Image (tube, helix red, strand yellow):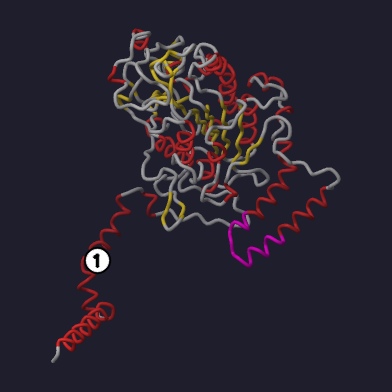
Amino acid sequence: MTQKELNNQRLVKEAEQRVLHHVTRRHFLQEAAMGFGALALGSLLPSCGSSAANTYKPIEIDPARPLLPRAPMFPGKAKSVIYLHMAGAPSQLELFNYRPDLMKLDGQDCPQSLLEGKKFAFIRGVPKMLGPQAVFKQRGQSGMWMSDHLPHLATVADDIALMNTVTTDQFNHAPAQLLFHTGAPRLGRPSLGSWVTYGLGTENQNLPGFVVLTSGGSDPDAGKSVWGSGFLPSVYQGVQCRSAGDPVLFLNDPNGMPRDLRKASIDAINAINQEQHELYQDPETIARIAQYEMAFKMQITAPEVMNINDEPDYIKEMYGVEEGKNSFSNNVLLARKLVENGVRFVQLFDWGWDSHGTDTSTALDIGFINKCRKVDKAITALILDLKQRGLFEETLIVWGAEFGRTPMQENREGKPLPFKGRDHHVEAFSMWMAGGGIKGGTTYGETDEIGYSVVNGKVEAFDIQATILQQLGFDHEQFTYEFQGRPFRLTDVSGRVLTDIIA
């Protein structure tokens, strides 16, 4: 037999061997033997995790009515959320984290141990340490430390759970805001409000399930992505409204268009959308139909619900309402009206808290104090008002920002700034929660003596998100959405529930 014939014979045997791998039980068992152990192990793993792993089923949504109210995984203590975000990041060292030892270092050069290997947004060279620019006292029966910048909030200290040890790894505004509100510092993920509305729907089918209100003269640095729906259906994105003028732009019918003609035009548009859906089976087309219907319903419901002018005078005084303005206090009162009328998630962004000390508006002893005065009364009124209406225990209030401020005074190019200010700080800052089953009068975690880093009780953005979902009735590890071939969740692969602040 020639060498060529031997080679051909060998190739034929190799081909036959490959066929056997696919068609015979012997080869299947030989190759897959180790896989049986993996199958057995996989059947055991769910029992080692959350109890929800064996009981939770994917959310079933009627595309034609995507906002219908739905039951959570387990009974949640909260039914709705009001999230108050102070965009720009207020200084925890002037509000909540009392560090008297920091005053002893005031004016001294910052130790190199606090600078080496660290990244700051603006600080260069050796800055000076800066003592607290506020007077602190212990408040309420709990003895919670709080500064005199928030005199009204101090009266309800026993209703809030304060976390002084929140951390982040993002020291620029936009990515830090995205991290807290979408679970990732980059664009493309659904926002917290979108996840909640996707999971629970909403109680009022004539209003959006997720409403956004902004104040301070600007949107947050991350833009509208912080209330976007990402890869979730677009019906779950936040709807930006206003507390002055028309609550939603283009809410009213155009001049010369009677309401019956408006309804006829929407019916015609939706008929075309329905044909498109039957042709392409794109679920976003059905969502678009639902959004047109929602917009039509809002023309009747929104003007009444979102009109704070009809509130009693004593309520307006309680919140510090500013007539005819799109102010933070007006937005907080509107947030109460929205959750009272069945809206699931209300997100408030108040811009202007970036206290660098470059001018009077960003000075800790001038502009910062003015900002505190503008929010203190309204936030306190929200807690008291929800209580008197029996809504406090079912409404979760979250207050916070994207990061904190440094214990040292900010400089630029190694030179001091004309006013007292602090740079962005990622290693320790303050947030708080109230209502919705949260244990009031709690102070969680501890920082070092100057408030630079966490000593115990570290809290990450994912922990905040996990705790919010827990209070709404969701196991954050099981609450997922299939996208691009894998399940995604708000907390990514991190997060733990902060059980110490839950009642």
Instruction: Give coordinates of residue 393: x percent, y percent.
Output: 52, 32
- Residue 473 located left or right of residue 19: right
Whether 201 is drawn above or below 394: the answer is: below
Task: Tell me the quarter of the image containing the C terminus.
Answer: top left
Q: Is the magenta stretch mostly helix, strand or loop?
A: helix
**Magenta span of residues:** 271-287
Instruction: Give coordinates of residue 67: x percent, y percent.
Output: 60, 49
Residue at x 42%, y 44% (from the top left corner): 476
Residue at x 55%, y 50% (from the top left corner): 70
- Between 321 and 88, the residue placed more toward the observer is 88
- Residue 482 located left or right of residue 332: left
- Between 388 and 370, the residue placed more toward the observer is 370
Q: Is mark 1 on a helix, strand or loop?
A: helix
Residue at x 71%, y 21% (from the top left corner): 313
Q: Can residue 177 be seen in this view?
A: yes
Q: Please tell me in which quadrant of the rendered image residue 410 appears.
A: top left
Whether 290 is drawn above or below 114: the answer is: below
Q: Give the residue number, with chain letter if any, for mark 1.
A: 36
Instruction: Give coordinates of residue 182: x percent, y percent.
Output: 48, 41
Task: Tell me the quarter of the image containing the N terminus.
Answer: bottom left
Q: What amino acid is at disc 1? A: Phe
Q: Please tell me in which quadrant of the rendered image residue 38 appears.
A: bottom left
Q: Does the magenta stretch include residue 274?
A: yes
Q: Please tell me in which quadrant of the rendered image residue 37 appears.
A: bottom left
Residue at x 58%, y 48% (from the top left corner): 69
Looking at the image, which residue sits at the far left?
A: 1
